[in-house]
């Protein structure tokens, strides 16, 4: 059984363990842990998104986990964080959680220097989130998505200079031999 632990600040030799047996932690499986600038601690557990604020051990289930799609977290320039565990969650810098709809399941995500969230869907399509909360498909990479050759965009990341990198896969060889390559979109 996995247990959640933290080191006691008064004595680093002591460890405090939080489990479903000694606290109101809803599930012992913690797959991701993040802290927002206001000091709120967030955990993605087998039960869902859990919030812990202050020094108390009052774990609060904020949203139940819907799917087991793996977990991802990316920071934003304003101190907020984006999480994905089968649904998209925005942890604001002030310690609140906002759940957002996505056009499809997310394979990869990154936030650029302007705070725009970029996601790669399961289909390999690229989307950017705009101010009203909707997603626009980034059509410049659509030609690389080719069902006949199983082409898709796999990953996105943002370099320190603001360049966006997209990792593409095209299966032009036998099914077990992938041919990866990358393109870069420089910040303009």
Image (cartoon, rainbow, N blue to C red):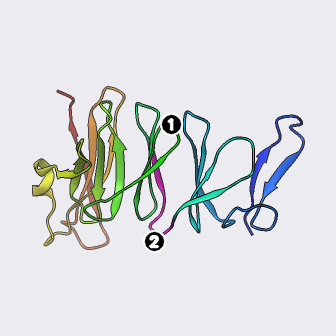
Q: Is residue 134 above or below residue 188?
A: below
**Residue range highlighted in magenta:** 64-74
Image quadrant of residue 152? bottom left
Left/right of residue 16 with respect to residue 20 in the rendered view: right
Residue 12 placement (x, y as % from top left): 86, 37
Q: Nearer the viewer, residue 57 or 81?
A: 57
> Which quadrant: the C terminus?
top left
Q: Nearer the viewer, residue 163 or 64?
A: 64
Q: Is residue 105 above or below residue 54?
A: below
Question: Dot 1 surroundings within 10 Å: few (below 14), some, or many (20 or more)?
Answer: few
Q: Using the image, tell me which numbered label, if any, was put on residue 44.
A: none
Residue 145 placement (x, y as % from top left): 16, 61
Front: mark 2 or 1: 1
Q: On the image, numbered disc 1 is attached to which residue? A: 94
Q: Using the image, tell me which numbered label, if any, was put on residue 67.
A: 2
Residue 185 is inside the magenta segment = no
Residue drawn at 32 percent across, 71 percent down: 176
Q: Could you tell me what secondary structure mostly forms the magenta stretch?
A: loop
Residue 115 placement (x, y as % from top left): 33, 35
Q: Secondary structure at mark 1?
A: loop
Q: How many numbered circles are shown?
A: 2
> Which quadrant: the N terminus?
bottom right
Mark earlier in primary sequence (2, 1): 2
Residue drawn at 21 percent across, 58 percent down: 125
Residue 91 placement (x, y as % from top left): 47, 45
Q: CA distance from mark 2 to mark 1?
A: 27 Å
Q: Nearer the viewer, residue 72 or 43?
A: 43
Residue 73 is inside the magenta segment = yes
Residue drawn at 69 percent across, 41 percent down: 54
Question: Dot 2 surroundings within 10 Å: few (below 14), some, or many (20 or more)?
Answer: few
Left/right of residue 12 with respect to residue 78 in the rendered view: right
């Amino acid at each position: 059984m996995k247990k959640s632990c933290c080191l006691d600040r008064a004595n680093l030799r002591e460890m405090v363990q939080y489990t479903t047996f000694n606290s109101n932690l809803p599930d012992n499986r913690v797959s991701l842990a993040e802290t927002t600038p206001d000091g709120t601690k967030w955990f993605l557990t087998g039960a869902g998104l859990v919030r812990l604020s202050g020094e108390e051990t009052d774990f609060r289930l904020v949203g139940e986990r819907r799917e087991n799609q793996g977990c991802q977290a990316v920071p934003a320039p304003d101190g907020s964080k984006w999480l994905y565990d089968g649904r998209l969650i925005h942890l604001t810098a002030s310690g609140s959680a906002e759940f957002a709809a996505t056009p499809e399941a997310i394979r990869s995500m990154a936030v650029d220097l302007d705070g725009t969230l970029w996601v790669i869907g399961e289909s390999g399509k690229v989307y950017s989130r705009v101010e009203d909360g909707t997603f626009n498909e980034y059509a410049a990479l659509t030609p690389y998505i080719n069902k006949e050759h199983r082409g898709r965009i796999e990953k996105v990341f943002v370099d320190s200079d603001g360049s966006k990198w997209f990792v593409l896969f095209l299966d032009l060889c036998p099914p077990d031999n992938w041919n990866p390559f990358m393109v870069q979109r420089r910040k303009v």
